[in-house]
Image (tube, grey):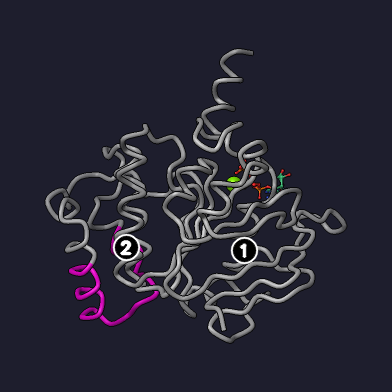
Amino acid sequence: MPMLKLENVVASYVPGVEILRSVTLRVEKGEIVCLVGPNGAGKSTVLRTISGFLRPSSGNIIFNEKAIGGMAPEQILKTGISHVPQGHSVFPKMTIHENLLMGAYTVKDKQVIEQRLEKVLVLFPWLKERAKEKAGNLSGGQQKVLEIGRALMLEPPLLILDEPSLGLAPKTMASLFETIRQLNSTGLTILMVEQNAREGLASAHRGYVLELGRDKFEGTAKELLESPEMAKLYLGGSTDGESYRSRRGRLRTLI
Ligand SMILES: Nc1ncnc2c1ncn2[C@@H]1O[C@H](COP(=O)(O)OP(=O)(O)OP(=O)(O)O)[C@@H](O)[C@H]1O
Ligand SMILES: [Mg+2]
């Protein structure tokens, strides 16, 4: 039984306008699964539906053998899914330390909070060195690591990341993906959405392509990266060329 399973999930923000038309996917324990696809395909909506911000109108969402579809976000958080949303979500005027503590706001036991904080600081020692600095002073990549650290304060079995590399320079992006792989090697299961499809898949075990609210392709990351159809449609034209996003950016620049 996979850790997370979505079966024919349908969801809408506005009644009658289906954004997710039928999404079926699974995440096995210990995997990094990467969800890719064009703008507006519904990638963030899939993650929001998993974490309870949107109620599926039909289909099943099963997490650790429990049906969680339609449960409230706080309940889903408690079952062990932590969601780092798209864009920036640090509290810029609070310190790094305070931001990390916010991740454990549902935990009442001070000793547990201290232990978890210590674990996160062992993973990311620079957060300890800069604990008293305002989070808003950090670079984009550092803020993303802080957001991940904050999500880890709940010790979730499953971490979901929405476009973690968005807006990062290539070198920072590479180091963030390295961080994600390291976290995974400690046993954390990860579902991430990436529009930097090539880079995201290169760090994942398996992937899915979402288009118009449906899963269109699925495969191991290697299969997807080597597929000529994927290359043509989502990887910028060749199996070793530039990424979908950089191509989009270039087109926009040309226009
Ligand atoms: N809060 C909302 N209310 C109504 N419609 C929404 C809302 N959020 C997203 N949508 C619509 O749902 C569709 C899918 O959006 P979603 O954000 O899931 O796409 P995405 O694949 O994550 O795109 P991107 O790559 O731009 O992040 C889009 O047509 C979008 O306009
Ligand atoms: Mg999105």
Q: Residues within 10 Å of mark 2 (few under 14, many from 20)?
A: some
The answer to whether residue 102 is magenta is: yes
Residue at point 60%, 20% (across, down): 252
Q: Which quarter of the image is occupied by the C terminus? A: top right
Q: Which residues are magenta?
A: 100-119
Vertical order, 167 against 118 (above or below): above
C-alpha gap between disc 2 and disc 1? 25 Å
Residue at point 52%, 78% (across, down): 3
Vertical order, 232 against 9 (above or below): above
Residue 20, percent across and down? 75, 58
Mark number, residue 53: 1
Q: Residues within 10 Å of mark 1 (few under 14, many from 20)?
A: some
Residue at point 24%, 64% (across, down): 120
Residue under numbered circle 2:
183
Residue 186, percent across and down? 29, 69
Which one is earlier in the sequence, the residue at label 2 or at label 1? 1
Q: Do the CB atoms of the residues marked 2 and 1 lie less than 8 Å apart?
A: no
